[in-house]
Amino acid sequence: MQATQVTKQSFLDKTFKLKENKTNIRTEVLAGITTFMTMAYILVVNSNILADAGMDKGAAFTATAIGAFIGSCIMGILANYPIALAPGMGLNAFFAYTVVLSMGYSWQFALCAVFIEGIIFILMSVTNVREKILDCIPNVLKDSITAGIGLFIAFVGLANCGLVTNGATILQLGNLQDPLVLLTIFGLIVISILLAKNVKGAFLIGMLIVSAVGMAIGLVEVPNAVVSSVPSKKPVFLQALSIPFDQIFSFDMFMVVLTFLFMDLFTTVGCLVGVASKGNMLDEDGKLPRVKQALLSDSIATTVGALLGTSTVTSYVESAAGIGEGGRTGLTAITTGFMFLLALFFAPIFTSIPTQATAPVLILVGVMMASSLTKIDFDDFTNAIPAFLTFAMMPLAYNIADGIIFGIISFTILKLVTKKKEEVNIYLIILSIIFVLKFIFLN
């Protein structure tokens, strides 16, 4: 028995270079569980968002869990980083509320776009193009896109729970006497306090508290089971490949894929650099070793996730929680992946969590993402105006893609007109022309 344990430890040490990274199996496993606790909310939130797009909620739950399992394991094995993956916030909102509900396409169309994006990213990661493209987008637009997505997500949360509604004016405050709205406000207060106190798993704990209170006072339906068989994934499995060719080669598909590419590119690279920096994993030049393997892992996970039936699977900034617990290798990511797989058997608990519990999470994730506004130089109007149009148009036009388009076009025009040509590259000019033509001929 002892010999077997030593052999297992030796195998894991050799595979993940535990000693070299000054860690051990126990630390890595606990770090993986911690990361899961901080991002398990995505099981509920993503299922609800995809259900809004018309997908089967149980199937979406299964696809989310398996996508997170596969993605995290690929990252752990291929790149040996303690970074977990799951369907990304913002990307799922664009999937459901822009592509499906705003543009009017089917969720199969959206899955196909994610699949195409994944294939393109695999090719770009292998050839290092993905890193080069990131350098072409000015930082002010990267920061404003992140903030805009955050505002969009927060707006979705506010609207879903009834805190904001349409009325005599374009928008108005919801009915604060509605018990369900009050339950949402309670959840917002609880999760805010947990976050302020740096409680690990604040989102998940908060959602469970709100759900329990809702069930206790009769506002939320009590699940009839705790453990169940795995929810089916057949209704969404491989549906990304069911789209007619005329839709695949349409201009709208091009625009949707391009937007997914931009969003995923910024999300992934920003997450990798930020999380790696927290764990002191960057080299002396501030670069991430094995970045090619990390980007490739992310790309493969996106492609596999689309085939399973979920929105873009990407790296999660919540991985920083596990790194804070001492996680330094891929064993942490793999542990998180297996926790997602285990969660499949507790689907009744997760799927019974109501909108009133998930809406505060959306709002507070928006708060976190909006922090990138502090990096924008608002004293320079050639930066401030494109940035404002980017993050303002996303929630106001209820379309993430429109925000990105307005930002790129205005940035390019202002820089060229004010003779700051050195801040504009040929790729931005080409994109601006394409976007202007879109508004002229396709809007």
Image (spheres, rainbow, N blue to C red):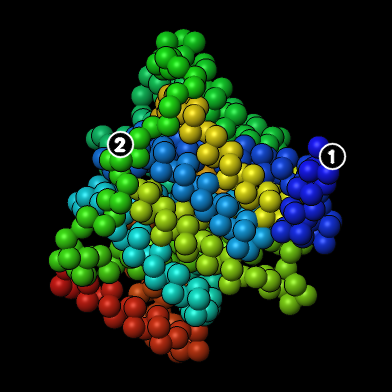
Say which amino acid is labelled 2.
Answer: Asp
Query: Along the horizontal axis of the image, is 286 left or right of 107?
Result: right
Whether residue 207 is visible: yes
Residue at label 2? 56
In this orientation, which residue lies closer to the viewer: 348 or 284?
A: 348
Quote the CA–CA distance across marks 1 and 2: 47 Å
Q: Assess disc 2: are there few (<14), some (14-19) or many (≥20) residues with their C-alpha within 10 Å of its C-alpha.
A: some
Q: Which quarter of the rendering shows the C terminus?
A: bottom left
Tag in front: 1 or 2: 1
Query: Along the horizontal axis of the image, is 393 left or right of 419?
Result: left
Q: Residue at 26% across / 34% down in the picture?
A: 167
Residue at label 1? 2
Say which amino acid is labelled 1.
Answer: Gln
Q: Secondary structure at mark 1?
A: helix
Q: Quadrant of residue 119?
A: bottom left
Q: Residue at 52% across / 39% down in the picture?
A: 341
The picture places residue 12, in percent across and down from the top left corner, at 74, 53
118 relative to 8, above or below: below
Whether residue 184 is visible: no
The picture places residue 217, in percent across and down from the top left corner, at 46, 10
Q: Secondary structure at mark 2?
A: loop
184 relative to 247, above or below: above
Q: In terms of sequence position, does the residue under pointer 1 or pointer 2 come before the other?
A: 1
